[in-house]
Amino acid sequence: MQHIKSITSGLFILLLFGFCQAVAQSLIAGIPSADVAEYRHIELTHESQLGAFNQPFKWNSFNILCYGLNRRTELTATFNNVNNSGSINFSPGIGVKHMVPLFDGVFPAWEGKLVLGGAYMFGLNQRSHGGWGYALGSFRLPAAKSRVTGGITYGTEQVFGFRSAGLFSSTSEIPNRTWAAMAGFEQPVAKNFSVIADWISGNHDIGALIVAGQYDWGHNVFILGYKLPNPNTGQVRAIIVEFMLALGHPKHRSPLPAH
């Protein structure tokens, strides 16, 4: 219990001071984006998944707070699986994401990026330790301005959830510790509006295709979309409502060059 209180108190302090998975936010819709938070810029992202077509009604959410450490690196604090169904998988975490520009001197219009990230995760219910890591490549098609992102990820049950113990079992307590593929697409349509989509492979809790529209105003983002789970995940189709709020603006230039 003391360990849980320590983790919770630490996350509260991170949230209070802004230290801590679509414009410079940390997600496309459900997977990490090629962007990082601006230098000394705080971003709060909340995603709600609303199972509006199911009885009983289901709600699940993911919450991310990011801080731009420099022009290529952000620090993150997350709290996954806050919902209305008595989740057994409440999971706070702290992590980092780093972006490396690719091919700037050869193909600058393609805006190539390598994105590496990871997080330490703690399962509050099971008092379990785990993690999440990913590597993504991303580039922009110059003519259409489309951004394509793809890569791999590995995570433990704090991210991927649990699977059924068997046909005649009433529990779902076998941890999902697995690899998955990730892919994303972002297409600007108008000045402040884009069509976005991303997908995570596998039959775990976050294995799904999400298609959405994204509207940007200033440094803030609003996303409305639809989640179609992969087969055999045990998840439900859901409306996705996501917003990113810029809680502060950078007051100093980064010591690293802009890319």
Image (spheres, grey):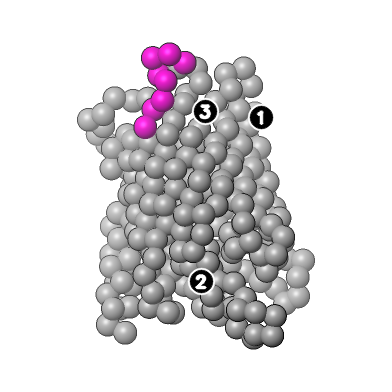
Where does the image place residue 13, in percent across and percent down from the top left? 28, 65
> Which residue type carries mark 2?
Pro
Q: Please identify, in this view, whether the residue under mark 2 or under mark 3 is nearer the observer.
A: 2
C-alpha separation, residue under disc 3 versus residue under disc 1 = 18 Å
> Which residue type carries mark 3?
Phe
Between 105 and 46, which is closer to the camera in this rendering? Answer: 105
In this rendering, position of residue 46 left or right of residue 70: right
The kind of secondary structure element at disc 3 is strand
**Residue under label 3:** 139
Res. 189 mark: 1
> Which residues make up the magenta segment?
100-107
Whether residue 150 appears in this view of the structure is: yes
| Residue drawn at point x = 39 percent, y = 27 percent | 101
Res. 175 mark: 2
Q: Quadrant of residue 60?
A: bottom right
In this rendering, position of residue 206 left or right of residue 51: left
**3 and 1 marks in contact (CB < 8 Å):** no
| Residue drawn at point x = 47 percent, y = 16 percent | 107
**2 and 3 marks in contact (CB < 8 Å):** no
